Each structure stands twice: as structure tokens, then as C-alpha cells.
Image: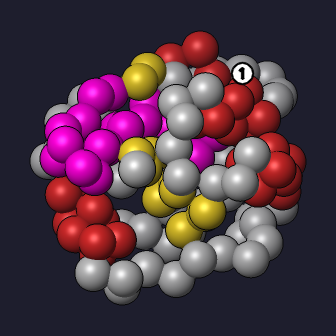
């Protein structure tokens, strides 16, 4: 299975980006291969609106089973949930750290968005 983590940059030492829709990009981590790739989210950094939905579609297109991020708004949450992606919010620290927490079942799955729309 693959998981996505909102990231401030393209390495596993990068920090988790707390803003899902306007994250710099996403680390797509393959749990079986223990490898990752970076997917850029640059087009949504300064979007007037719709950044969360567009970012959610990027994540859906990566065929991941879970997303780890700082915060997730209602529209993005709806898109991700409809695709069957489990969402974990409240993540902080490095990509490596939150992936380990995920592997150790130390993250709590979100049941709803944790911020209102247009959170900046």
C-alpha cells in the first residue's frame, strides 16, 4: 500500500506541511518497497479557490490508501473519503517521523474535516 504525506519539500527529512491543499507537495511512500517519490502541488500554492479539491484529486490519482497531513478542509475531506482514502490529521514533525508513527498505529484516523473551508 502507498500513503501520501503533505510535505514542505521533496525529501523524507522534510517537515509535514500543515496545510493540505496548499502544501508544497506530497511524499508518496510505498510501504512494501519502503521507497518514496515526491509529487509537486505547486499549481495550488497560490490558487484563489479550490486548492483543497485539486490537491485531493492529485492524491487520489496516486492510488494511495491513506493521507497524513496537518489539517484537511471539508471539500478535500469529502473527495478523499469518497475515494476510500483514510485521512490522518494533526501530524507534525518530519516525513520520516510521521511514517513511523503510521506504521506503529500511533496516528488517529479523522472522521471529519478539522478546519473550515478556505483555511490559510
Kindly identify the residue that appears in the image at 30 percent across and 66 percent down: 98
Q: Is residue 44 above or below residue 92?
A: above
Q: Nearer the viewer, residue 84 or 28?
A: 84
The residue range painted magenta reads 19-38
Question: Is residue 55 among what the camera can see?
Answer: no
Looking at the image, how many numbered discs can be counted on the residues? 1
Magenta includes 31? yes
Where does residue 34 sit, x and y in percent of width and height? 17, 47
Front-most of residues 65 and 21: 65
**Horizontal placement of 98 versus 111: left or right?**
left
Q: Residue at the spot x=30%, y=43% of the render? A: 30
- Residue shown at the point (64%, 35%) measured from the top left: 60
Query: What crowding class fits label 1: few (fewer than 14 Cα within 10 Å), some (14-19), or many (20 or more)?
Result: few
Quarter holding residue 73? bottom right
The residue positioned 28% from the left and 52% from the top of the image is 31
Q: Does residue 58 sit above or below 106 in this rendering? A: above
Q: Where residue 56 sits: x, y (%)?
A: 68, 37
Amino acid at each position: 500500500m502507498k500513503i501520501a504525506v503533505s510535505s514542505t519539500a521533496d525529501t523524507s527529512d522534510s517537515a509535514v506541511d500543515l496545510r493540505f491543499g496548499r502544501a508544497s507537495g506530497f511524499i508518496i511512500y510505498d510501504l512494501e518497497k519502503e521507497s518514496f517519490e515526491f509529487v509537486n502541488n505547486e499549481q495550488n500554492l497560490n490558487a484563489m479557490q479550490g486548492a483543497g479539491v485539486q490537491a485531493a484529486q492529485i492524491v487520489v490519482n496516486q492510488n494511495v490508501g491513506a493521507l497524513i497531513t496537518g489539517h484537511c478542509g471539508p471539500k478535500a475531506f469529502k473527495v478523499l473519503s469518497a475515494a476510500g482514502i483514510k485521512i490522518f490529521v494533526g501530524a507534525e514533525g518530519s516525513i520520516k517521523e510521521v511514517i513511523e508513527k503510521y506504521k506503529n498505529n500511533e496516528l488517529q484516523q479523522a472522521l471529519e474535516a478539522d478546519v473550515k473551508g478556505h483555511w490559510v
